[in-house]
């Protein structure tokens, strides 16, 4: 145990995800030994981010304004919406530069163990966005785990309406990998999801 | 397949141990509490990533140490493999094949063994959960993909039970109920795969079990296995365990499609009960494997000797099934303290039944308990020291 404020700092850092007691201690001492200016800057950024960043009123993505950059971008296609669990999934898909439509961030997945039901997700907002018929395709890109799949199934049943195509991301083998290194579950899924080669 | 050498470091009572093993029969003899079972437990761990004695790994690490290491040299034909696992007290375990790191859960595919132990008696006399575990472990050995399916099923079950419980607390008309259908769907699709796999396995084990029982007991007793599937039961009582009504019994293979149909209607039938009690009442987690001798349930009717013969027959049958499908030779048979429990004639017949396996490793407290045919390579164990025959 360290004295007073140092231990308090270590405890606070240790509360962050992915940081154990040892890392917390290392970071705390790094902060102690750094020039005052850098620490002030870090503190300012921390306060600023809490103050400025909010959630896009349309899609739920993180944003510094009422709506996010993607929703405001006129070049994005308004006919396709990609539904993801978290804002960080938006960044992952954006990195591909393949998708030119809009997003909808649910804010999690259905998980009764954690007390999260459909009412706790931004599903009502999604339905409102679909109401005027502009959107013709919804791509469900929830995580390929049990909770993500359950959420996808729920949405699929909810979104049955004329003129709307609902699709789900494929799951299968990683590109550039070797078949022999794939684990059984992934390889098994890839078998299930095999498709006819066009002839 | 056979083990030619086993090395341990900080495993149970061994600070370090080196054990040479021969093809054919190997006998480890020593008084109680000297460390015989610890040696075979280590081998079992390499093949199943679990112990037959404890459910937590850290019990296997020598007191005061941070990690235990189990290393075995395995041979199959011309091929030699060095398999190693490090069991860590405070971090994830690590595995290596030929000094190269691999995922720990992939270790079992390099080494298959079947372990017989006094604890196996619970397969016959114990609760259904032990028999489900027996089937599931064998399923995973044969088809590793199923470990994912079984893990998913357990997760769905937890999610669905939490939903049922919260629906019970906040009243049945809660909005949470709208998602029950979704979890029903997952439960049915995943659970039906398990039902299909288990019933197919039972059909395959059935003739092997009967043959093994006849071989061990020396007489025909029609040892048989029947699945008791909770999804087939039409009873609506609130019996806490499996509904042991005859309509839930089936000897045949139930395909996933058929299982799904029964599963869905069973859920519908039990919906009210499920909401009332807040738990999932049908599915493979409430199934059982019914063991019978001459048509009578072994649990309750079989004598001690008969129960033992049945437990051994189940293990022999699983070894036979693994052997038939193996591309790397026979599984290694490990007989931990089994002979002390059997009469002379059963000892001789068990010895004969395992004699043609590539390698058999036996532990015994009393040398004379083990039939001479199995006293091939004898090793004495005393206070955590391994002594070759003739050494003192």
Image (tube, grey):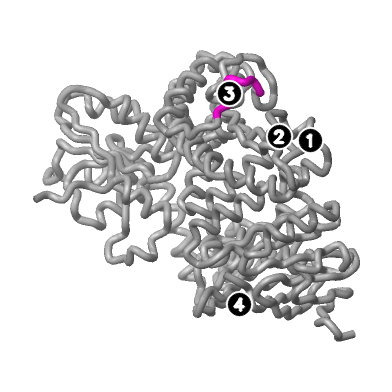
| Front-most of residues B219 and A112 | B219
User: Which mark is first along the chain, 4 or 2?
Assistant: 4
User: Which mark is first along the chain, 3 or 2?
Assistant: 3
Q: The residue marked by circle 4 belongs to what chain?
A: B
**Quarter placement of the N terminus of chain A:** bottom right
Judge if badges 1 and 3 mark residues of a common chain: yes
Label 3: how many residues lie within 10 Å, few (<14), some (14-19) or many (20+)? many
Q: Residue at x 89, y 64 (%)?
A: B32
Residue that numbered label 2 is attached to: B293
Residue that numbered label 4 is attached to: B73
- Determine the image quadrant of residue B352: bottom right
Q: Position of residue B116 (x, y in %)?
A: 72, 55
Q: The residue marked by circle 3 belongs to what chain?
A: B
Secondary structure found at label 3:
helix
Q: Which residues are magenta?
A: B244-250
Q: Residue at x 35, y 46 (%)?
A: A87
Label 4: how many residues lie within 10 Å, few (<14), some (14-19) or many (20+)? some
Res B302 label: 1
**Of the residues tagged 4 and 1, which is closer to the observer?**
1
Count of marks, rendered view: 4
Secondary structure found at label 4:
strand
- Vertical placement of A186 versus B19: above or below? above
Label 1: how many residues lie within 10 Å, few (<14), some (14-19) or many (20+)? some
Res B248 label: 3
User: Which mark is first along the chain, 3 or 4?
Assistant: 4
In this view, which residue lies farthest toward the bottom?
B391
- Whether residue B31 is visible to the viewer of this picture, yes or no, is yes
Judge if badges 1 and 2 mark residues of a common chain: yes
User: Which mark is first along the chain, 2 or 1?
Assistant: 2
Spatial distance from mark 4 to mark 3, Cα to Cα? 46 Å
Q: Is residue B324 left or right of residue B348?
A: left
């Amino acid at each position: 145990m360290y004295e007073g404020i140092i231990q308090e700092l270590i405890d606070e850092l240790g509360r962050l995800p992915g940081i154990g007691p040892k890392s917390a201690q290392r970071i705390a001492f790094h902060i102690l030994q750094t020039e005052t200016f850098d620490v002030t800057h870090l503190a300012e950024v921390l306060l600023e981010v809490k103050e400025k960043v909010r959630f896009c009123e349309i899609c739920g993505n993180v944003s510094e304004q009422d709506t996010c950059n993607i929703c405001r971008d006129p070049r994005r296609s308004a006919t396709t919406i990609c539904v993801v669990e978290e804002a960080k999934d938006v960044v992952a898909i954006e990195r591909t530069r393949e998708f030119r439509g809009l997003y909808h961030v649910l804010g999690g997945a259905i998980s009764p163990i954690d007390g999260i039901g459909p009412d706790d997700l931004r599903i009502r907002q999604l339905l409102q966005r679909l109401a005027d018929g502009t959107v013709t395709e919804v791509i469900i890109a929830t995580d390929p785990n049990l909770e993500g799949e359950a959420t996808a199934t729920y949405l699929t049943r909810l979104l049955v309406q004329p003129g709307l195509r609902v699709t789900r991301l494929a799951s299968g083998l990683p590109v550039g990998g070797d078949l022999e290194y794939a684990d059984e579950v992934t390889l098994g899924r890839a078998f299930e999801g095999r498709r006819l080669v066009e002839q | 397949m056979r083990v030619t050498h086993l090395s341990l470091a900080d495993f149970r009572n061994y600070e370090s141990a080196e054990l040479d093993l021969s093809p054919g029969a190997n006998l480890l003899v020593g008084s109680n509490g000297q460390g015989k079972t610890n040696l075979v437990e280590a081998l079992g761990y390499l093949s199943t990533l679990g112990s037959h004695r404890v459910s937590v790994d850290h019990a296997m690490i020598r007191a005061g140490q941070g990690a235990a290491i189990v290393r075995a040299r395995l041979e199959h034909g011309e091929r030699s493999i060095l398999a190693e696992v490090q069991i860590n007290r405070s971090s994830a375990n690590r595995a290596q094949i030929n000094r190269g790191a691999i995922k720990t859960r992939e270790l079992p595919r390099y080494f298959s063994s079947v372990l017989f132990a006094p604890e196996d008696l619970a397969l016959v006399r114990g609760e259904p959960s032990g028999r489900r575990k027996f089937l599931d472990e064998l399923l995973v050995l044969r088809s590793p993909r199923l470990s994912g399916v079984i893990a998913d099923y357990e997760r769905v079950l937890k999610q669905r039970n939490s939903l049922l419980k919260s629906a019970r607390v906040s009243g049945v008309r809660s909005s949470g109920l709208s998602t029950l259908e979704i979890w029903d769907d997952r439960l049915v699709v995943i659970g039906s795969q398990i039902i299909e796999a288990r019933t197919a396995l039972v059909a395959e084990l059935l003739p092997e079990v009967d043959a093994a029982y006849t071989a061990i007991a020396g007489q025909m007793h029609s040892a048989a296995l029947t699945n008791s599937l909770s999804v087939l039961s039409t009873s609506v009582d609130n019996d806490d365990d499996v509904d042991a009504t005859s309509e839930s019994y089936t000897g045949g293979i139930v395909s996933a499609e058929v299982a799904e149909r029964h599963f869905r209607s069973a859920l519908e039938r039990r919906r009210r009960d499920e909401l009332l009690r807040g738990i999932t009442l049908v599915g493979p987690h409430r199934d059982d494997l019914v063991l019978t001798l001459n048509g009578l349930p072994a649990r309750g009717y079989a004598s001690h000797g008969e129960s033992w013969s049945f437990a051994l027959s189940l293990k022999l049958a699983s070894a036979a099934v693994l052997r038939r499908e193996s591309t790397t030779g026979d599984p290694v048979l490990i007989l931990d303290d089994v002979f002390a429990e059997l009469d002379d004639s059963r000892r001789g017949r068990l010895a004969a039944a395992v004699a043609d396996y590539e390698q058999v490793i036996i532990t015994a407290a009393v040398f004379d308990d083990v039939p001479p045919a199995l006293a091939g390579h004898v090793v004495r164990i005393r206070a955590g020291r391994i002594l070759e025959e003739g050494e003192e």
